[in-house]
Image (spheres, grey):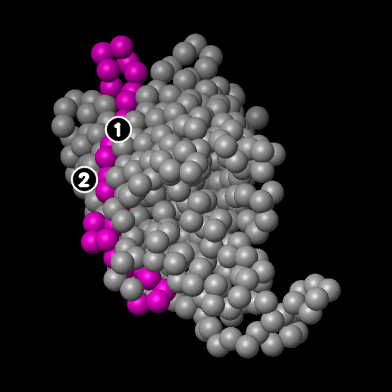
Amino acid sequence: MSTYPNDPGHEPRATSHELLAHSSKLMARGSKLTALTLALSLSHSLFSQDIHLSQFFNAPLVLNPANAGDIEGDQRAALMYRTQWQSAGSPFRTQAFSYDLPLFRQRMKGRYLGVGVHLFSDKAGNTKFGDTQGNLSVSYAIKSGNESLLAFGIQGGYGQRSAVLNGMRWDSQYNGAGYNPDLPTGETMADASTNFVDFGAGVLGKGETKSGALWKSGASVYHLNQPMVSLFGSNDDRLLRRYVLHAEMRFEGKKWTWLPKVYAQQQGGGREIVLGALMHRRINVDSRYTTHMNSSAIYMGCFYRWNDAVVPTLQFEWQRKLVAALSYDINVSRLRAQTSMRGGMEVSIQWIGVFDDKRMKLSKSKVY
């Protein structure tokens, strides 16, 4: 849920980026002084929010650095791609990669040291305004009971904010009949960029209820140092702290497993609440003593981003190793008339590996 005076249904990431992405089109219809004033005012007054992902449950290090190493296998790699507001003009694209693993889990008897890296690129519109960043997450998990675990995580990273300003359109490039990119702009605005160091921290708890349901919840804060990210050297444009709360449960049924999830975050004046659930059913069975068979699973579900979008989600897991998910934002905010209810498509792929499978491996001649 976002709180903006003129549009409570606007998500924070799209609001600032949409104005920046289309500023070049507005500049072409006004004077050079107006164009420059608009570019500067956007840089100072519209602080950019963090990357926005509907499949928050498939982006563990974006959710909480304490998630590093919290996996059933020995290592996890994930790729994500999101495109948004395609129907409104120049789209906003987000690409992300993460890799994490738990260390010393067997040696530490249930405890572990989690390590993860997270890279992303987020660009908006014709000016390609956005951030590119790499982060390192480290977590430490301890047992807080027979069935409970408590993990603490920290994250540090290095990022760059940039914009291709020399690609904007100017009034001097309109010849009366239309836009001609070969005409001189008469301007000397170079591409702009700034670099910054970033830090975050989080805590994660998980366990099992008396009825056998599994639960997990956590809290995190990003941009603890609130780094300056102005493209024009101003001290007013900072990356504001992002506060995150998340929780989920797992209810095992005879045929279907239910996975309700909730996620809330606040960054500056923007707030977001997402709630919903996935249900999944396993296909085939797992071999207990040999590596002959691993089951697969199909997931179906839907999430609701408060006052913004409905997000149907489909996910398939292959042999407990590869997970592919597809979701689409159906816009239901006040922008639905302009977007025809089309929001954003998101695709993710996860691979979960096992270093040492203790089950016996059968030769092909013994498999029937």
Give the SS element for disc 2: strand
User: In the picture, residue 144 is in which quadrant?
Assistant: top left
Given the current orientation, which residue lies at the most extreme left position? 144
Q: CA distance from mark 2 to mark 1?
A: 12 Å
The image position of residue 287, as x and y in percent, is: 50, 28
Residue 220 falls inside the magenta stretch: yes
Q: Is residue 264 left or right of residue 132?
A: left
Give the SS element for disc 1: strand
Q: How many marks?
A: 2
| Label 1 CA crowd tier, 10 Å (few <14, some 14–19, many 20+) | some
Residue 209 in view of the camera: yes
The image position of residue 236, as x and y in percent, is: 31, 67
Residue 207 falls inside the magenta stretch: no
- Reading the image, the residue beneath label 1 is 217
Q: Which residue lies at the image location 47% right of the left edge and 20% below the top edge?
A: 258
Name above or below for residue 286 compared with residue 20.
above
Q: Is residue 177 left or right of residue 119?
A: right
Name above or below for residue 302 compared with residue 271.
above
| Label 2 CA crowd tier, 10 Å (few <14, some 14–19, many 20+) | many
Q: Is residue 11 left or right of residue 178?
A: left
- Which region shows up in magenta? 208-233
Between 190 and 175, which is closer to the camera in this rendering? 175
- Reading the image, the residue beneath label 2 is 152
The image position of residue 192, as x and y in percent, is: 47, 78
Q: Which residue lies at the image location 29% right of the left edge and 53% below the top edge?
A: 241
The image position of residue 57, as x and y in percent, is: 44, 38
Q: Work out whether mark 2 precedes mark 1 in sequence or the reverse, and give the earlier one.
A: 2
Name the amino acid type tagged 1: Ser
